[in-house]
Every structure is written in structure tokens, then in C-alpha cells.
Image (spheres, coloured by chain):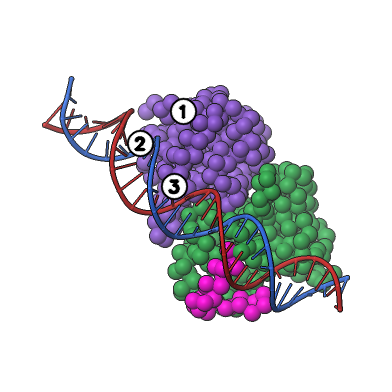
Chain colours: A purple, B green, C red, D blue
Amino acid sequence: MPANDNEALAGLIRKLERLTDLNADDRRRLLALPHRLEKVSAGTLMVREGRDTSECCLLVEGFACRHKTTSDGGRQIVSFHMRGDILDIQHLLLPLADHNVEAITEAIVAWIPAAEIRRLAWERPNIGEGLWRDTLIDASIFREWILNVGRRDARSRIAHMLCEFVTRGVAADLGPGDGFELPMTQEQIGDATGLTSVHVNRTLKALRDDGVIAQERKRMIVRDWARLRAIAGFDSAYLHAAGA
Amino acid sequence: MPANDNEALAGLIRKLERLTDLNADDRRRLLALPHRLEKVSAGTLMVREGRDTSECCLLVEGFACRHKTTSDGGRQIVSFHMRGDILDIQHLLLPLADHNVEAITEAIVAWIPAAEIRRLAWERPNIGEGLWRDTLIDASIFREWILNVGRRDARSRIAHMLCEFVTRGVAADLGPGDGFELPMTQEQIGDATGLTSVHVNRTLKALRDDGVIAQERKRMIVRDWARLRAIAGFDSAYLHAAGA
DNA sequence: CGATTGATTGAAGGTCCTCAACAGAGGTGG
DNA sequence: CCACCTCTGTTGAGGACCTTCAATCAATCG
């Protein structure tokens, strides 16, 4: 397994430290969380809608998304995730999964018993506060996504998705925001923005032609961050501490 | 003031009892929460995006919504609320409001100091668990709304919004679901579904012509619940305990 | 009772979708 | 190591759904 145990939980601690104050004891308890590491390939479903869950899934490395489907098969991605994110923290208190969690690249995840995290949340108020705040920021991002698919056109919508991804990636130490690995396919961008992959393709081409972005393979370069922001109408306030 | 103090907090207790176990002491502490009642008219903004907040707003009577706007003025409603709902519980841990909260009918709200609720959440684990679970259900509803505006056509989208409203209304003791007061205008339905009021009008007419619903004034009658559900692709699982 | 807000309907147009074909990249197995 | 296959990206043509603009009607309210 590529990541050792300490590294696996260190990502979670780094994230919580952006959200709350942790003392030495808090950190010790977090590092002592029982867990098992798993390497998964792109496309693996870590959580299935409707299933009972007793473990929480921490993303140690790689990228993942959460998605839901309509009764006639339409698929909607509701969030993207990167290292340090707990992918299904809501299962601490809601045992039945209401959506799927899928790896979109090869990834390493750590499975942690929900009961252990729950206990820690109540015994260490700092940790509980951080975890609760994390779920509240999740909810804030969901609200922004409702606005994104509901009220922006394809161009702004995709630009906004890119802005958010860059901003969160920088916060998660994935490197500088001007050039970065874009882990999702155009089909997945479509599923996240409520568009078809065909229209995503045309819209990305337009953004390239306008000199706002550039692409080579899966690598994306932001040529003009100010313009991308303006097209998206992006204001990072909704990310709260998570995107600071 | 139409509602007395006990009635005001009783709605919150009823709601929390659907989400967690409360003992006599929990209930006593909840009833002892300091608060002030306010009667507000339709259109009143209780919370403004970007503002610092130190009080939480409990909806005692009437209806409200939360909404956001794009930089060029597009407006998106991200949730509707009814009595018993805490309208901005995220401000317990996120001081800066990332959206607006607005009364859509005349309403009675109770303002409760956020610090008092926060204290109760940590001192009474049952209450904390119930409140956290409530915010997680909120998030689940947001996810469903992303799916709704992202992947359903106007007809299913509006049908889904109606199904959710009815289901939550029944759970909140607002009366039977077959005939009920629809508090929002067609413009607000449009803002919630990412459509224009014109298209909402045409779509509602189609649903009426098909015998699925009927309307008189602001009153809506569900003529064929099975068909409305089918059109919406509605499955109440995402409401978790809140819509049981 | 005039004024304002919300509902209703028509006509024209635009954004995005569907269907379809093809190119390129990457992975697999013989 | 190359042939093959699959997945992803790309582009074109036509059409559907929803929007925009506009006018009219109904209901509510000061």
C-alpha cells in the first residue's frame, strides 16, 4: 500500500485544522482511529445509494465524486472530492445512503468505522465542531451548485465548476492553480453541470478559442484567471474556510 | 403576538423528536431557550448574504425560502421551509451567511442566540445529534435539488417540487396531502426549479389539463398522487426521517 | 376604485440536445 | 510489438425545449 497509516490520517488532520482548533490530544486521538486502507481503480463505487453503511470513507489520494440518478437513468454528479475529504460523513448520522460515491481516478481510501468517528466527535468537542462544520460547508457548496445548474448558462456553469475545482485544489495543497491535472472526463463535467458531453466539448473549445484556458491531454492551464472568474461570476465566500 | 412562548418552541421540539430521542431534561432545556418572537410580512429578508449572524431564526408559523443570486442578477431558490424548521442553523458554526432567507408568506419567527443553541448542542448530546442530523438532511435535500434542476425536464421538475412540498407538509402536520395551501407564486416556483414563470405557468396548465392536479386560488389539489409521483420520479428516501 | 401584483396566453427565437460519424489515445492480448 | 478494441474527444446537422418579449386578464390592496 503506497501510503502508510500516518500519512493516511494526516490528510484528515490537515483538513480539520483548517476548520477548527485541534490540540495535541485531539491529534493523537485522530491518528489512533482504526482504519483499513484500500486502493481502488477509477470507476469503483465506494458507496451505493440505498445501502446501509457502518464505515466512513476517507479519500487519501486521488479524486472521487458523488452522484445520483433519476428514475429514467439521468445521472447527476453533486460534488467532486479530493484528498482529505471524507466522502460520506453524513453516514455518521444517516445510516441509509441517498447517493453513490465513485472514484473518478485510481485512488486510495481509508475505511473508518462510523461509530469510532461518532464517539470522537462527542468526546472531543473540537473534533465534533470541525466535522459538523465540514458537513455545513458541504451543504453550502451544494447550494452553490443548485444556483449553478439552475441559473447559469453553459459557459458560466463550466467556468464556475473550474474555478471551484482550482480553488479547492489549492487549499488541499494539490499545487498552484494556474496549471493542474483535470481528473474528470467531459462526460463527467456534463453530469456535474447538467449538460451533455457534446455541449461541454463545444463550450470548452469556445473557452480555449477565447484564450481563457488551454488544454493539453488531461492537463488544464488557466490562461486568464480574472476572465475565468468573471465569466463564472465566481466568489469563493461560499467555500467558507475550506477554500481560504 | 399570536403564538405564546411555549407554542413557539414546541414546533422545534416536535421536529427534533422526529430526528432523535429527547428525554424530559432535554425538552426542559429546549423550552428554556431565550428567544424573541417577531411577526414578519411576506417578502421580509430575515438573513442577508454576506452578513454576520449571531442569532438563529426558527420558523414558528408561515413559509419561507432560502435563495442566492448570480452576479448578473439571476435568482435561485435553494429550499422552502415550513413551521418547525430552523432557517439558518448553519450559522451556528459558519458566521458569514452565504445566502438570503426570506419569508414568502406572513410568518412568525423566533430569534434564538446562536451561542445558546451551540451550548445546548454540546451539553445535551441528544439535542446535538438531532440538530446535526437536521443539517445533514438539509444537505440531502440540496443534493436532490441539484439532480432536479440538472437532470429533469420542466414537467418532472415541478412535479418533484410539489411531491416534496406535500410530503414535508404532511410530516410537519400541515394537514392532509391531497389538498393544501400552495404558498409560493409561479415566479417563486420558477426560481426554485430554474425555469421562467411563463414556462411554470404552461407546465402547471398541462398538469391540470392531464387531470394530475387541480388549482383554485392558491389552493392546490392533487387529483392523482400516483401519477404525480411517477411524473416526478419521486422517492422520499432522500428526506430521511424528516419526511417519514 | 385605481394601482399593483400575479396568472395566462401567443409568437418568435436561442440555447442546448439528439443523433451520427470519425479521430485519437490508451490499454490488452496474441 | 503490433493489431485491435474501447473510451474519450471532436465536429456537423437538425430539432426540441425553454426563453424572451409582449399583451391581456384576474385578484388583491391601500
Can you see residue A228? Answer: yes
Q: Residue at x 51, y 65 (%)?
A: B155
| Residue at mark 2 to residue at mark 3: CA–CA distance | 25 Å
Which region is colored magenta?
A: B199-224
Magenta-colored stretch includes residue A123: no
Q: Residue at x 60, y 29 (%)?
A: A225
- At mark 3, the secondary structure is loop
Circle 2: is it few (<14), some (14-19), or many (20+) Cα within 10 Å? some
Q: Considering depth in this image, is B232 or A92 the residue closer to the camera? A: B232
Circle 3 residue: A196
Magenta-colored stretch includes residue B216: yes
- Amino acid carrying label 2: it is Ser
Could you tell me which quadrant the C terminus of chain B lies in? bottom right
For residue A138, above or below residue B227: above
Q: Considering depth in this image, is A44 or A229 the residue closer to the camera? A: A229
Q: Residue at x 77, y 56 (%)?
A: B45
